[in-house]
Every structure is written in C-alpha cells, then in structure tokens.
Amino acid sequence: MTDRAPSRRGPQPPAAAPQSDAPGLPARRLAATVIDEVLRARVALDETLDRLIPPSGLDAADAGLARAIAVTAFRRLGTIRQALDERLDRGSPRHSGLLEPILTAAAAQILFLDVPDHAAVDLAIRHLHEDPRSARYAALGNALLRRVVRERDAILAEAEADPFRDTPDWLAESWRAAYGEEAATAIALSHREEPPLDITAKADPALWAERLGGILLPTGSIRLRERQAIATLPGFADGAWWVQDAAAALPVRLISPAPGERVADLCAAPGGKTAQIAAAGASVTALDRSAPRLRRLKANLQRLGLAAEVVTADAASWQAEPFDAVLLDAPCSATGTIRRHPDVAWTKTEEDRDRLAALQAKLLDAAAGLTKPGGRLVYCTCSLEPQEGEAQIEAFLARHPQFRRAGASAAEIGGLGAAIDAKGDIRTLPQHLPGGTPRLSGWAGFYASRLIRL
C-alpha cells in the first residue's frame, strides 16, 4: 500500500474498543502482528511465528489459523497489495498504525482462505479499533474490505492473468535473464502453490515410503501425500527419518561419502546434510557460527541416533587438517525456497544477494584450503540467482587452478538428467519434478557443483 495524504475532512473519530475478545480475533491479531514485524524488521516468517505463537497462548486451531493467514499473505502479497492500492483513491494513510497489516491479513482471508467473509471483515474492524492510530480509519477499512469482497472474482481473474503479480520486479527480471520468459513464468506460478513435504530416511526409503503412505521419488527422498503433524508420524520418535526437501538432499549425493572418510559440513545447521553424511558412515564435522542453530542440529542428531563432531566457528577463518570431502552449503538469498518461505521474496533485495555473493566467495576460498589433494569440494546454495551459483563457481575456478569440475551424472540423482546443466552442475527449478497434483509437484530451486582438488 502506498502513502496517502490525510483527507481535508480529517480522520473519523475512533469507536470504542470492544471489552473482550471475539472468537477468532486473537488469531487475526497475531497474524497481523507477524506480517507487520516481518515486513518492518525483515526477519524470517517461520522464526517470527515460532517466537510469537507460544507466548500468545493460542490453542492449536487458532495458532494454525494465524500461521495460515500470515503464510498466505506473503505468498500472494503482490495480489493483495495491488487489490488494496487500486481501491484507495488517495493511497494508504500515513501514520496509520497497524492499518496496512490488518487489511493485508483480512484480504488474504477474503481472497484465498476458506474463511467467512463477514468474519474476516468484522474481526479486522475490531482489530483496527484497538490501535489508536488505526482506529480513526476503521470506516475506511470497512468500506475497503467490503469492496474487496464484492470484487473478489475480478481481483482473482486479474491476478491469474499476470503470473508475476506476486513476484517483486527485481526477481522477475533476474529469472527472465537467467532462464528465459517461459521458465521464469513457471517459477513464478509454482510459488503460488503450497509446497510438498519431503523426508529423508536413514535407511530403507522404500519401506518408509510404504509405511507412511508416501511417494518414493527417483532420488530416494520420500514425498508425503498429506499434511500431518510430523512428530506424530511413525518413525519420527524412533529417529528413522528427518524432514528435508528433495532438492536439498542432492548435494550429499555428489559427495558420495564413504565409511571411514572425514567430511566437513560447513554452515551445517540445521543439519539435514550432516545427518545424510553421518548415516552413510563417514566421520563428519558439522560447523556453524550460530550456537543456537547448532543446538537444534545436536537435538536432531540425538533423535536420529547419529554422531558428528559439532564445532561453533566461522567457516571463513576456521582451520583444520584437510578433509577427504568438504560440503559448503553457503548462506544465500534463499530465493529457491520462496515456495516454502514466501516471505523471502519480500524481505530480500538485490543488495542482499550481492552482499551474500561476496561472502560466498570468501567461504569458498576457505573451503578450498580444507580440501586435501584428490578430495571433493561440493558447493551449493538454495538460490535461483546465478550470481550465487554458476557465476560463483566460474570465478572460483579462475582463482584456484588446482581445482576442476567433476560433473554430476543422471544416475547419481535418480536419472533426473534435466536437473544437470551443460557443465555438469546441478540446477533444480521449482517447477521441475512433476507430480499428480500441484502440491505434489516441484521442489526447491537449488544449485550444486562438485569440484576435485588435483
């Protein structure tokens, strides 16, 4: 929503706030607070939800509703913003408190969620009354949301005709330049769909696919058919498997860790790739500079019954005896995960991408020093941006002539040769890996390159 100069008539007087919460209002209140915080502070949506839901005291149903509203709002933020902006004659009011996030949460419900229109509108207006800065615009908000209800079909038809409506311009331009118009369009459309849920089994994936009623993918990952509470599924408490996007599981296949080998997993948290390496029987050192994230990694390994040496350090300066193999899953803009983390599209910028690319180069140079002669170095990012993938490896090879590419083969990744580029690197796109339904199709956008130290 854009800024709007105050009307000459001045704001409407605020109505009295309700004396007690209406059913469903706490969930909407939390959703709007989360939307506001993520956009204002550019913090991760999942982390914000995980931090704010417990102290809110919401029951499971209301917590789930708050999460659904917030996730949907970011997944379709471009459509929602345009729908609201086009129906505000003079733009969004300045100094209007929580007006924008409250209206965004309400529009997400009206347009995309199975919520009664009257509940979405009435509870949004109640919420506006609670904030002195937004209460004076309650009448405006009421009229605007009721217009969105009346014009819902037209709003959705316009959005359907514009595949990039929910993609920031800089990302659309980047994807067009890298992959062409058709592929860029497919990427943008895939991000509108709910993501699949994949898991990696510690052993015998065919057995666990059958037990969980899932789909055994060609790469060995298991795709769950239905959304369920993860911790209640068979095998979770026993440590038989862990949640991991199918594309994120591919880089360890390039390492092909063997029992007795020493492998370094740099920037390892939360530990899915560490678990893969340990399950293969290699001796793995998991390094990350974030102690809180490493605590989560340790907890995951403990549940899985797997062992690793865990080190809290900065991979850019850490020194150790060279390893047989090094995996660098570098910090990146994470644009390949937008389908699962839709806030990324709205909290990351071109400047973030370029800043992270500089860090990736520094980390790659450090990883080179940790790779022994004849050893493998696998670099990967969950980014769709070539600056963080293909261009990064070309620059690295120019700096380090003692390394050469060792291209991936289709057999190493379940026969999915379409995910291997002309130079032998892995490049997955969100629209790859078709399934029976949109939700069961696709995977994260990932890049991975295997290098050998001569």
Image (spheres, rainbow, N blue to C red):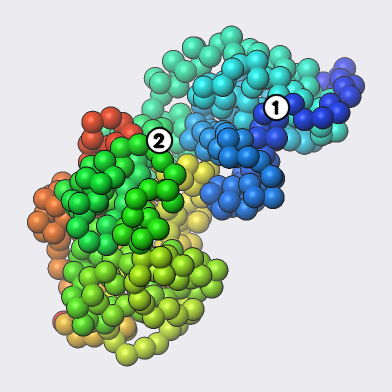
Tag 2: residue type?
Glu
Tag 1: residue type?
Pro
Under tag 2, what secondary structure?
A: loop
Badge 2 density bin: few <14, some 14–19, many ≥20, Cα 10 Å: some
Q: Residue at x 41, y 41 (%)?
A: 228
The residue tagged 2 is 194
Residue 452, quarter of picture: bottom left
Identify the disc placed on residue 115.
none
Q: Position of residue 132 (x, y in %)?
A: 85, 33
Nearest to viewer (mark 1 / mark 2):
1
Front residue of 130 and 360: 130
Residue 142, quarter of picture: top right
Q: Position of residue 442 (x, y in %)?
A: 28, 40
The residue tagged 1 is 23
Q: Position of residue 186 (x, y in %)?
A: 30, 34
For the residues labelled 1 and 2, say whether their Cβ atoms are less than 8 Å apart.
no
Front residue of 133 and 226: 226
Give the spatial CA distance, label 1 vs label 2: 27 Å
Quadrant of the image containing the C terminus: bottom left
Q: Residue at x 38, y 28 (%)?
A: 163
Horizontal side of residue 3 vs 166, given as left or right: right
Residue 409, quarter of picture: bottom left
Badge 1 density bin: few <14, some 14–19, many ≥20, Cα 10 Å: few
Under tag 1, what secondary structure?
A: loop
Q: Residue at x 70, y 35 (%)?
A: 26
